[in-house]
Image (spheres, rainbow, N blue to C red):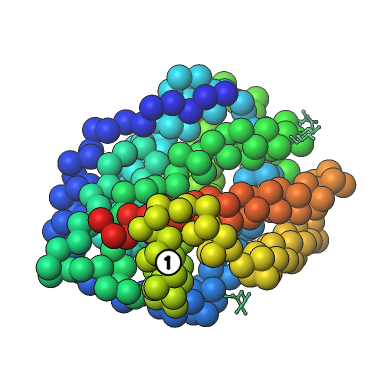
Amino acid sequence: MRFTAVAVVATSVLAVSAHESQAFFAVPALTQIRDILAQFEAPIVSTLVQRFALPVKPQLYQGHNPPLQAYLGAREIDAILHGRYNYGTLEYPFTFSTIAADRATSQNTFPAGRFHQDSFVGNPNLMAFYIQTLVPSMNSSTTPYFYHLSNSTQQTVPDPNREDGALSLDVTLLQLLSNRAHVGKIVAEAKFTGDPVTYTKLIKARNADSIRMLLANTTQEASVLAQADTAAIQLSNAWIASGALVPSTFQDTIRTVAMKTFRNLIDITTEIEVQYLLERLH
Ligand SMILES: *[C@@H]1O[C@H](CO)[C@@H](O)[C@H](O)[C@H]1NC(C)=O
Ligand SMILES: *[C@@H]1O[C@H](CO)[C@@H](O)[C@H](O)[C@H]1NC(C)=O
Ligand SMILES: *[C@@H]1O[C@H](CO)[C@@H](O)[C@H](O)[C@H]1NC(C)=O
């Protein structure tokens, strides 16, 4: 399965909105960012549960220009018009490629604690994870478990490649994951603020490996994974308790998938943090 080259049609729109709404944003303290990140977990797991209750149709995700890409592209054009990717939202599109990065100037020397926009976007990594890992594990049923009365996989009219229920949940999930991962930019800024001398030395040496090691906090990672597991248990229990006709493996599947998702999210977020810092002294 391949998810190929992104469309660039509205690149100029994005660049314009980035410059026009330029503002200075102070990043929150790291403890507050961690509390915010914890609030992302239930919505992500809840959307996973909903998506896994619908069947997967492989053709939505395959080929040169899969239906998911077309669907996402249309949604993102609308999202641009509604300001979703404006400067400082920590939201980035999947199907448009260019982000206008800030350059340090005499007015904005990138002081510690102030957000600046860098050029790195983690969405290609997220999309690869989604297509290669998550989609293949959505295989436990050919019929919807609960909230669609019809068997959507068997519908051929009007077009089997238009599956709004599934694609809409795919997009919601991708956007939640993406926003969660790009909060890494302000995590990085907050960590830099905590020790500018050490980070500056490593950035000047372009030492990505040591920056990655300095950023890592295995205690924090373990707590993120534990919270994701708790959410997976609670939300799949609630789903089962309300009478969803799920297979007996449903909860195990959701827990496994939630673990994989958050493990991957941590790695993608760390890469976003590293790249943000490497561009800090431009
Ligand atoms: C579903 O996917 C999982 C993970 O990719 C795999 O272990 C399992 O065997 C698959 N089950 C079916 C019925 O294909
Ligand atoms: C949906 O599919 C299941 C199993 O394939 C079948 O038992 C059921 O009758 C179908 N329902 C409808 C509404 O077609
Ligand atoms: C790692 O994260 C935990 C919170 O999960 C925090 O209490 C601790 O201070 C952090 N350690 C470092 C070195 O930042």
The reply to whether residue 109 is visible in this rendering is yes
The answer to which image quadrant residue 153 occupies is: top right
**Where 217 sits versus 71, above or below?**
below
Label 1: how many residues lie within 10 Å, few (<14), some (14-19) or many (20+)? many
Q: Position of residue 216 (x, y in %)?
A: 58, 63
Which residue is at a point 45% across and 47% down the rendered structure image?
122
The answer to which image quadrant residue 154 occupies is: top right
Q: Position of residue 42 (x, y in %)?
A: 62, 64
Which residue is at a point 58% across and 40% down the rendered structure image?
129
The reply to whether residue 60 is visible in this rendering is no
Camera-nearest residue between 163 and 49? 49
The count of marks equals 1
Quadrant of the drawing holding the C terminus: bottom left
* Three-letter amino acid code at the position of disc 1: Tyr
**Where 150 sits versus 188, above or below?**
above
Q: Position of residue 187 (x, y in %)?
A: 46, 67
Q: Position of residue 160 (x, y in %)?
A: 54, 23
Which residue is at a point 14% across and 63% down the rendered structure image?
105
| Residue position for label 1 | 199
The reply to whether the residue tagged 1 has its Cβ within 8 angstroms of ligand 3 is: no
Q: Is residue 145 left or right of residue 216?
A: right
Which residue is at a point 47% across and 32% down the rendered structure image?
68
Q: Is residue 253 left or right of residue 271?
A: right
Indicate the quadrant of ligand 2 in the picture.
Answer: top right
Q: Is residue 2 left or right of residue 28?
A: right
Local SS, label 1: helix
